[in-house]
Image (cartoon, coloured by chain):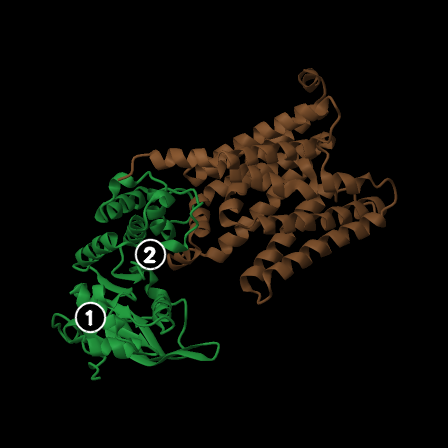
Chain colours: A brown, B green
Amino acid sequence: MDFLRDLLAFPFLQYALATGLLASVASGVVGSFITVRRIGYIAGAIAHTVLGGMGLARYLQRVLGWEFVTPLVGAVASALLAAIIIGVVTLYGREREDTVLSAVWSIGMAVGIFFISRTPGYNDDLMSYLFGNILMVRRADLALIAGLDALVVVVSFLFYYKLEAVCFDEEFARLRGVRVELYYILLLVLTALTIVILLQVVGIVMVIALLALPAAAAAYLTRRLWHTMIVASALSGVLMTAGLALSYKPNLPAGATIIILSGAVYLAVVGSRPLWRRRRAQAPRK
Amino acid sequence: MSRAPSTRSVGAPRAPATLPVVQFRKVSFSYSGEPVLQGVSFEVLPGEFVSAVGPNGGGKTTLLRLILGTARPQAGEVRVFGGPPERARSRVGYVPQYARFDPLFPVTVLDVVRMGRVGNFAAGPYRREDREAAEEALATVGMPELRRRPFSDLSGGQRQRVLIARALATHPELLLLDEPTASVDRAATAKLYELLVELARRLTILLVSHDTGVVSRFVSGVLCVNRTVAKHPVSRLTGEMLSELYGTDIALVRHEEEL
C-alpha cells in the first residue's frame, strides 16, 4: 500500500514503473524471437559487452568533460557494436562460435572495469551497471528508453513475418529470396537495443533472465509466435510491477526481486507442463 | 550392368526440343577433398517424376544442393530451367525433412504454409494473394481443416504434407523433396505417394529416397546415385542394378516384396 501511495507522490517511482512497463513490451517481443531462434547465449554476450561502453562513457564524461556521452549513450553504442561484430563473425567467420562469444563478452567487461577504475569519484557506478538500479532512472533517460522501445517494437512488427520465417527455417527462407543474413543481424541489433532498455531495470548480469524466462514460459502456453509475444510482454509487465511493489517497502533490490519472481513463474509453468500436454493430447485429432 | 544413355528422357516420349528442367553436364563435386560426385551428366525433362536413390553418402543430398544452388560444382555445369540454379529458385519448391524442425516452435499449420510466400513482399503483413495461395496449397494436400493446429502436434506424415503445401504455395514448376518418407509410417507413406502422383500430373518432381522398392512403383524414372549418376526408366530397373548400387540384395528383396 505504501508503494501505491508513494507511486502517486514521487516521480522517481513513476519513472521506475514506466521504465519497467516499457521494457516489458520490447523484451516480450524480442525475447520471443530470441527464444525460438535459440540465441539466448548471444544475447548474454551482448549484455556483458555493454559494460565496456558504459565504463568508457563515464570516463569521457568525468575526465574529459564530454557531458553528452552518458552511460546510456555508451551502452547503446557498445551494444550495437557487439551485435554487429558477433553477427558478422558467426555468419561469415571460420572461428568457433563459443570462442568468439567468450572473447567479445570478457573483453567488453575488461574494458569497462578498466575505464571505471581510471574514473575518479565514487564508484557506485559499477554496481548499478552490473545489477541495475531502476529507482535511479531520470526523466531524460526515460525519453531515450521510450524512443528505443518504440523503435524496437515498430521494426519488429514491420519485419515480423520475415523474422518468423528466418527463425523457423533459415534455409527455406534463403531459397525464397529472403536475405537471411541481413535479418539475422537485424535480430541481433533489436536484441542489443532491448538489452539497453532492460539494463536500466535489472543490470547487465541479469538481463538475460528477463529476455529468456517470460518468453520461454509464454511459448509453452501459446501456439503462434505473436501470441507468445503478447503473453510474454504481459507477463513481464506483471513481473516488473510486482517486483517493484514487493521490493519497495522492505528496501530489497528491485532487479533481483523481479528476476526471482520471473524464475518462480517459469518453473511453475514448466512444472505444470505435463498438465498442458495432456490437455493438448485430448484435443480432437483428425 | 548396362546403363541407359544418361541424356535420354524416360517415360512418355517427348519432342527433342523440350528444354530440360534440370541439366547436369560433367559435374564433379568434392567435399573437403573427398569426391562426392564425379563427371555426372543427366537431364530431367518437364513432366517427369524422378526418384534419386542410392546409399547414404552416395551424393543424393549433394545432388539436391547443386540443383538448389546452395552448393557449386568444382567442375562441369548445372543448369535449372536453362540458367544458373540461383536464378531458378523462384520456380523451384523445396521440401526438407520434417524431423529437422524445432518441436517447441509456436507455429500453426497455416503459419508454416504461408512461409512459402515470405519472399514475395518487402515488409509488413502477407498480402491477400499470399493468404489465398497458402489456403489453396493446404487444400491441395488435403488438410484445410487442420490449418489452426500447432505444427508440432501433427504426425510425421501430416507434417510432411504441410511442408509440401508450403512448397506448393510458391507455385513451383519443379518440386524437390528430400527423403519425404523418412520416419513416416507405412500407411502415411502410401498416402504421401498418392499425393505426389497426383501432383506429378502438373509438376516436374525430383525426390531423394532410400526407399527404392516403393518408389519404383510410382515414378517414371530413377537416378541411381553413387559417386556417379545413372538414369534408368523404371521398366528397365532390375534387381541387378539395385544390388550393384547398394552392394547387397536387400533392395532387390524389398523391391519384389513391394510389388
Q: Quadrant of residue B6?
A: bottom left
Circle 2 packing at 10 Å, graded few (<14), some (14-19), many (20+), is: few
Is any atom of residue B219 visible in this view? no
Comes first in the chain, label 2 or label 1: 2
Q: Nearer the viewer, residue A239 or B201?
A: A239
- In which quadrant will I find the C terminus of chain B? bottom left
From the image, state whether disc 2 or disc 1 is nearer to you.
2
In the rendered image, which residue does mark 1 sit on?
A: B221
Q: Which residue: 20% across, 75% down?
A: B239
Query: Farthest left residue?
Result: B13
Asked if one can make out residue A18 in the rendered structure from this viewpoint, the answer is yes
Q: Quadrant of the N terminus of chain B?
A: bottom left
The residue that mark 2 highlights is: B183
Say what amino acid the circle numbered 1 marks.
Gly
The residue tagged with tag 1: helix, strand or loop?
A: strand
From what the image shows, is residue B8 above or below residue B131? below
- Tell me the CA gap for discs 2 and 1: 24 Å
Q: Residue B126, image x and y in percent?
A: 36, 43
Q: Is residue A129 above or below residue A180?
A: above
In the displayed structure image, the side of residue A2 where residue B42 appears, left or right: left
